[in-house]
Image (cartoon, rainbow, N blue to C red):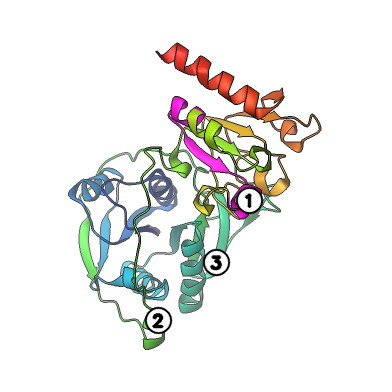
Amino acid sequence: MAKALVFIDNPGAALKKSSLELLTIARSLGEAVAAVNGELHDDVAAALGTQGVSALYRPSATDLDDYLVAPKAAYLAAAVAASGAQTVLLENTADGKEIAARLGVKLNAGVITDVVGVDADGTAHKSVLAGSYTTTAKARTAVAVLTVKPNSVDVGAPAAASTPETVTIDVRADATANAARVTGRAEKPVSGRPELTEARIVVAGGRGVDGDFGPLEELADALGGALGASRAATDAGWIGHDYQVGQTGKTVSPQLYISAGISGAIQQKAGMQTSKVIVAINKDAESPIFEIADFGIIGDLFKVVPQATEEIKKRKG
């Protein structure tokens, strides 16, 4: 049976939805195995078994996070050799794509990024031109490396759970891989809101907020949702780049996406157009965002959003 290797980097106390999506794809391709970096909690190990993972690979080195991505690529290359996997699945993040590129060189493997779906025969559906089109591609090499966009796949459950065998992988990175070292980290402030890519509700603001995300934060908190932003807002320094949704930011697919003061350029649409329900608020009736919105409000967000927040609080309270 064909094997698909899923890379799970620092899973924390529970598996993320994006990891469950990768495992769902892996099972559709054959036998699912996982390579985990970082601390492995008992609950995560148990969850991997519940997800049908037959083998769990762990690096012999415990300092992979002290360097940039090159040692992780070396670890994955060794895990592929040990497992015999024909497909490697990673998240379509900046790190994930760089690791995939390095892995492709090491394994002489075909690399496909921006994947939004995978058929049982390994054919990948790839989002291109800022999400305007979806193409298909298939690697003809012995190993295929795919990076999958979060919120692209419906999470499924395996037919039966398993008890994965744990295998330690000897990581041997060359000197150049360890040439750059991470010298410090700062803890990201906790907002109390859900992770942007995992949230069921996202409230996003753009150039129209004119630097004031306060009303959108109140609405997001009233709905129990996450806060997002367009590239224009993050480039202006009004909010951190971690909040950016779009082609060069994060891809989200929540049940409800509220767009306030965002024109809806094609780059922004690429990161949110698969949302189940889209509500757009903009003063310009000709804004492209209204082309994909399920509900549109032509008005001043500084009048509309506070009214919505007040009504939501009233109904909740």
In this rendering, the answer to whether 123 lies above or below 268 is below
Residue occupying the point 54% across, 38% down: 253
Instruction: Measure the alpha-carbon separation of dots 3 and 1.
Output: 27 Å
Q: Position of residue 140 (x, y in %)?
A: 57, 67
- What span is in magenta? 219-237
The kind of secondary structure element at disc 3 is strand
The residue indicated by pointer 2 is: 177
Residue occupying the point 62% across, 47% down: 233
Numbered mark located on residue 231 in the image: 1
In this rendering, the answer to whether 238 lies above or below 112 is above
Q: Nearer the viewer, residue 224 or 139?
A: 224
Numbered mark located on residue 111 in the image: 3
Q: Position of residue 5 (x, y in %)?
A: 38, 60
Quadrant of the frame with the C terminus = top left
Residue occupying the point 44% across, 52% down: 29
In magenta segment, residue 307? no
Residue 165: tell me if it is visible.
Answer: yes
